[in-house]
Amino acid sequence: MLSSEIIMLAKELWDYHHMNHELKRSDCILALGSHDVRVAARAADLYLQGFAPLIVFSGGLGNLTSDIWTVPEADQFAAIAIQKGVPEKDILIENQSTNTGENITFSQRLLKESGLDPQTFIVVQKPYMERRSFATFKKHWPDKELLVTSPQYSFEAYPTKDITLEKVINIMVGDLQRIRIYPAKGFQIPMDIPASVWQAYEKLIAAGFDKHLAR
């Protein structure tokens, strides 16, 4: 059982990682692969609600899925979308990428090879990866208009048997570190991190939530 202080610190990071964008109709939904299949369901729902006429599912087997799956993330996500009623003709699959940067650049290449040039995107990602996905997309594709969203869950409701609260906190800590260090590596655009968020990050590391840090 995690203490109330750990929960409070984790919520600080959870809230920061959300971009809180108001969605509008766009040219393309880009769903980034992961271990959370609810991302696929969210992307499919947005398509079915008329937010975009095309979905690109991007993801091979990455850091969190290479040990648990053999079928690429994008293929699994596409199957979920088709089961929910998205026509196969409106889906593109990019199943070679292994990280967020490759999600973007490999999807760029796939769209170009398909003769498509969407100008506006809705990127769908896990709740605690909205901000990092935004920063990565804008680095690699600065001329496109971008909104980001995620499965609609509260912090308390998000964890599952497989995606435990401890795992969520570790990943959130690691993603915040990447938001800080990746711009210098050319992976993302810089994003402002409020002092209170960074203090929460440091306290969580001191409490042992360091399993997802970049070494």
Image (cartoon, grey):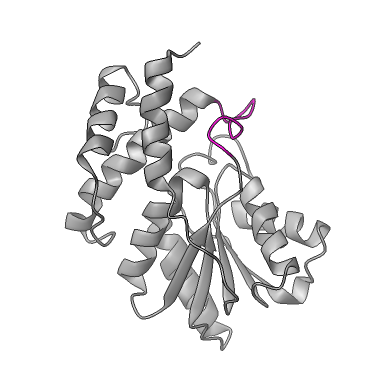
Above or below residue 156? Residue 84 is below
Rendering coords of residue 11 (x, y %): 42, 32
Q: Closer to the camera, 170 or 2?
A: 2
**Range shown magenta:** 154-164
**Image point 48% across, 66% down: which residue?**
147
- Residue 54 placed where, x, y %? 65, 75
- Of 74 and 1, nearer the camera is 1
Q: Identify the image quadrant of residue 190.
A: bottom left
Quadrant of image for the C terminus: top left
Q: Is residue 172 visible?
A: yes
Q: Is residue 140 magenta?
A: no
Query: What residue lies at 41% left-to-right and 57% top-to-bottom?
Result: 133
Instruction: Say whether residue 126 is left or right of residue 211.
Output: right
Q: Is residue 157 magenta?
A: yes
Quadrant assignment, res 51: bottom right
Number of numbered discs: 0
Q: Main secondary structure of the magenta part?
A: loop
* Residue sticking out furthest to the bottom: 115
> Residue 64, percent across and down?
50, 39
Q: Residue at x 51, y 46 (%)?
A: 127
Query: Residue 43: x, y in percent?
Result: 65, 60
Residue 99 seen from this side: no
